[in-house]
Image (cartoon, helix red, strand yellow):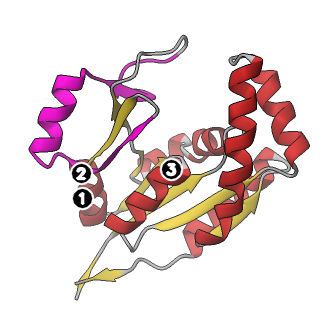
């Protein structure tokens, strides 16, 4: 049995559940010094206003993506709507080997694929306090049309039902309380051994 030194933490939620805000808070300067890292996926979609290449995602062409798939570059990859998303394998393996925490902010589909690939990963589902609160948060973003919001609400209802498939569930009623709960779960979870 080989002992991993690091942890993989997969945080998922429906759109508007708060996973991205929680991940941002978790990656404080002191934790970055302790070897905490945020997994930056590759995507073939266009960059949105406010995003930066290499911060939210690495934005690449379909052709480049296919080459990386062929060379086994990704730990997991999948298509959402019309675009490809992939998780680079090397940074993950480095964290497991050297210690620290690799943090993922992914949808339910990505969480399942990553857990299949890395069964030792800790999975945490962030639940909104209520459907009404989730709808309010999504509307306040002001980034989607009514039609897009309707699709997101429907998807969120379906995704929320899957929270029982995760190791832990945290209700995001108040951001900093939820952050502390997630931090406690990560800190108290033992590092697993692999074959």
Other residues around mark 2 within 10 Å, as few (<14) / some (14–19) / many (≥20): some
- Residue at point 29%, 55% (across, down): 92
The residue nearer to you, when weighing 141 against 135, is 135
Sequence order check: which comes first, mark 3 or mark 1? 3
Image location (x, y in percent) of residue 121: 43, 68
Image location (x, y in percent) of residue 192: 38, 80
Q: Please say whether residue 188 is visible from this viewpoint.
A: yes
Q: Is residue 32 above or below residue 168?
A: above
Residue 31 is labelled as 3
Task: Identify residue for label 2.
Answer: 89
Residue 137 is labelled as none
Residue 55 belongs to magenta span: yes
Sequence order check: which comes first, mark 3 or mark 2? 3
Task: Identify residue for label 1.
Answer: 93
Disc 3/disc 1 C-alpha distance (Å) = 19 Å
Does the residue at mark 2 contact the one at mark 1 (Cβ under 8 Å)? Answer: yes
- From the image, state whether disc 3 or disc 2 is nearer to you: 2
Other residues around mark 1 within 10 Å, as few (<14) / some (14–19) / many (≥20): some
**Horizontal side of residue 81 vs 132, given as left or right:** left
Part of the protein shown in magenta: 51-80
Quarter of the figure with the C terminus = bottom left
The residue nearer to you, when weighing 36 against 40, is 40
């Amino acid at each position: 049995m080989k002992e991993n030194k690091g942890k993989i933490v997969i945080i998922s939620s429906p759109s508007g559940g708060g996973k991205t805000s929680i991940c941002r808070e978790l990656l404080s300067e002191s934790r970055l010094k302790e070897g905490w890292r945020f997994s930056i996926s590759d995507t073939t979609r266009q960059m949105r206003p406010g995003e930066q290449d290499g911060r939210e995602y690495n934005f690449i062409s379909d052709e480049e993506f296919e080459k990386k798939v062929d060379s086994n570059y990704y730990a997991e990859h999948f298509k959402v709507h019309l675009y490809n998303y992939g998780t680079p394998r090397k940074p993950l393996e480095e964290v497991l080997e050297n210690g620290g925490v690799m943090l993922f902010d992914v949808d339910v589909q990505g969480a399942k694929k990553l857990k299949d690939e890395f069964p030792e990963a800790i999975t945490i589902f962030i639940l909104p306090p209520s459907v009404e609160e989730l709808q309010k948060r999504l509307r306040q973003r002001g980034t989607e049309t009514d039609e897009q919001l309707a699709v997101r609400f429907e998807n969120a209802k379906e995704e929320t039902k899957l929270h029982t498939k995760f190791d832990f569930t945290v209700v995001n009623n108040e951001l900093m309380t939820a952050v502390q709960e997630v931090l406690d779960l990560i800190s108290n979870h033992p590092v697993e051994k692999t074959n």
